Image: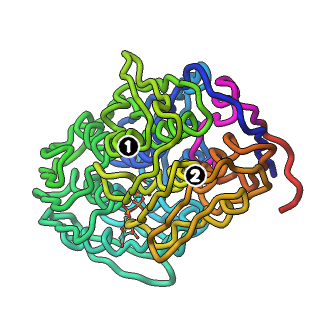
Amino acid sequence: MEKIVIEGGHRLEGQLPISGAKNAALPLMCAGLLTKDGLTLHNLPALADIKTLSSLLTELGSDIQYSGENKGIGQGQAVTIAVDHITSTTAPYDMVRKMRASILVLGPLLAREGEAIVSLPGGCAIGNRPIDLHLKAFEDIGATIELKDGYVRASGKLTGGTVHFPTVSVGATENILMAACLADGTTLIENAAKEPEITDLAHCLVAMGAKISGIGTSHLEVIGVPALHGAEYSVMPDRIEAGSYAIAVAMTGGELELIGKGLPHVLTGTLGILRQAGLAFTETDRGLIAKLATDKIIGINAVTQPYPGFPTDMQAQLMAMMTLCDGASVITETIFENRFMHVPELCRMGADIMVNGSTATIRGIGGLLGAPVMATDLRASMSLVLAGLAAEGITEVNRIYHLDRGYEHLVQKLSACGAKISREKADNM
Ligand code: UD1
């Protein structure tokens, strides 16, 4: 196993390419199951989660070919997913356990084969994360759902219908959207999630021949078609990666041009909060320049919300930034019930944070101190990297397999902009 070692206190300068979004790439790859023709995706990030999903799709009968498009850091790779025949409709426990997003094969398998058997994902480090909303929505459009031996079996011919989500769910919206494309009827999805990754998926499905209206809104209408065809599609840039690096600039000083098409738009919600905290952004023809426009980071109040609100996936990174604010900050987490696990580790680096239920109060301190730390999930790990970049002395971030799930070429990208950061062999932890 490896760890990341950071010598803090170095300014970041230069250009930093933003990779394709993991959370867009995963559902897009699952959409490949909906057609017999090949779906080619460009700008796919090279991440552990993408490999995990590739293995699952292969197990279901996909032929997956990666092309040598990866021309350099942040340039992305291309993949063609061809699924002439689905050879299995079962997503086994071993795969779903590794990555919860595996549940997104349920909708495409059910729509194409009339059956999908997917292991229940079980608990997760950032909360309970049930899949009841997915299952109820499949029932609403004609499926029969049975739960047995830790597996969900969805079956039947999809007829379409009206789905009204009581709470906004990104994954459930994606799953039902994919399934509805091949239903024998029209599906209305009300209170749909509006995250840019869903818009990306919808545009790709339309390129494959789906009939979807209301894209980008909370009311989606899908007129089912008998079959979808192949397409080529480019994955959107990762707004969470971009937001994380903007925070790195705020915490270390300097100026970064974040390179990625459409970044200002997909960063809605994040930019507003970061501007309040003192960051300035300038649009360029390639992306966005980020720098701190004030002497000190300004303390703010932030509440995580579905898009276009401030994303829960940026909460841990924002908290790392607020440890250095002038005054105090309050961050409230409304999406996941157990997403403050970075707090004790940040406190070990000197942060002053008090948690009360879903609210954290952060009092700004003069500076963080490097320490050996470890995290339990992807975004928490990034908050510790950010703290390490700003801290005095050496920070060692352990259990970096979390980071490898979501931040492509992290060490190379930050090193190229002046950070002192490396991967080294870890002691057994
Ligand atoms: C996706 C993202 C994740 C992000 C999250 C919220 C991917 C691969 N992952 O996760 O990075 O943090 O959106 O923006 O895109 N819920 C239920 N029942 C369900 C489904 C969800 O109660 O059937 C609850 C969840 O526990 C959570 C809330 O709804 O409290 C939102 O979850 P959801 O939007 O579904 O998150 P994911 O799709 O799992």
- Magenta includes 416? yes
Does 179 appear above or below 119? above
Q: How many marks?
A: 2
Instruction: Evaluate whether residue 37 shows in this view.
Output: yes
Residue visible at 51% across and 42% down? 297
Residue visible at 27% across and 42% down? 199
Q: Who is closer to the viewer here, 267 or 399?
A: 267
x and y percent of residue 131 in the render?
Answer: 38, 72
* Numbered range of the magenta stretch: 403-421
Left or right: residue 197 compared with residue 369: left
Q: Secondary structure at mark 1?
A: helix
Q: Amino acid at mark 2?
A: Ala
Quarter of the picture for ligand 1? bottom left
Picture quarter containing residue 183? bottom left
Find disc 2 in the rendering and name its residue.
320
**C-alpha distance separating marks 2 and 1:** 16 Å
Residue at far bottom of view: 148
Find disc 1 in the rendering and name its residue.
276
Q: Earlier in the sequence, mark 2 or mark 1?
A: 1
Cβ of disc 1 within 8 Å of ligand 1? no
x and y percent of residue 404 in the render?
Answer: 65, 46
Instruction: Evaluate whether residue 55 shows in this view.
Output: no
Picture quarter containing residue 185? bottom left
Q: Amino acid at mark 1?
A: Gln
